[in-house]
Image: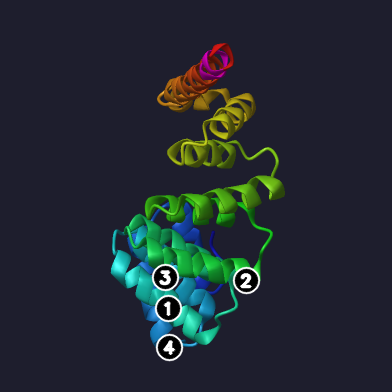
Amino acid sequence: MVMSVDNGSPLEQAVGLIEAGHFERAAKILEEFLQENPDSVTGWYNLGIALNECDREDDAIKAYDEALAIDNEVFEIWFNKATLLYEMADFKGAIECYDRAIEINPDDAETWNNLGNCYSRIGEGQKAIEAYTRAVVLRPDYAEAFYNKANAHFIEEEDEHAIAYAELAMELNPELRTMVEQWIHVARDRIAAAKSEEEHKHRKKKLRKEIERDR
């Protein structure tokens, strides 16, 4: 999301270009603007957006850092930086930024969902589940977060939870069925196998008791 600006300013022109998809032109205007206005949080923030869209990720990170050096209490800057770091596969860096965003706004469901994705990518399954849970509590119709929570439970082999949340995700968004069907049969098979193993153990235990009784 771009930040609002005063009408008639170079920032307004740049924001309009960003919204129209003319990112290189927007970046040029913003770079020129910031030479004269280096303390503009809005300028650096929007430059970060433009540079990211120009596939200049490292420069975009630097722009976000310049904005944060001026004001580190802006939720959108931390969120955008975190999202970019995630795309760059710097998952631990993204976690740090999402955590800062959550400190500023703990009620943003998308941030919690994205934080869960970061933990999933570094193999922290239970932390991912906790983050997804916060997301769906904040937004009970958040189908993507329900799916992500289901998938995290599946990876942790908590299959009953995985199936329950997967079914809820599909109710909210039937288009998720294709993704769910890639693994839900495995979860069901594991539940069936565990049940069969438990029944086998029960039969063996019962048989031993009968043999001991008949001796």
* Circle 1 SS class: helix
Dominant secondary structure of the residues highlighted in magenta in the image = helix
Range drawn in magenta: 208-212
Q: Which residue is mark 3?
A: 47
The x and y percentages for residue 100 are 55, 71
* Circle 3 SS class: helix
Q: Are marks 4 and 3 in contact (CB under 8 Å)?
A: no
Which amino acid is tagged 3? Leu
Give the answer, above or below, for where 203 lies relative to 96. above
Q: Are marks 2 and 3 in contact (CB under 8 Å)?
A: no
Which label sits in the foreground, 4 or 1?
1
Which amino acid is tagged 2? Glu
Q: Does the stretch in magenta take in 28?
A: no
* Circle 4 SS class: helix
Q: Which residue is mark 4?
A: 36
* Residue drawn at point x = 48 percent, y = 79 percent: 67
Give the answer, above or below, for where 11 lies relative to 205. below
Q: Is residue 78 left or right of residue 122?
A: right
Counting residues from the start of the chain, the first of labels 2 and 1 encountered is 1
The foreground one among 92 and 59 is: 92
Q: CA distance from mark 4 to mark 3?
A: 14 Å
Q: Which residue is mark 2?
A: 103
Counting residues from the start of the chain, the first of labels 4 and 1 encountered is 4
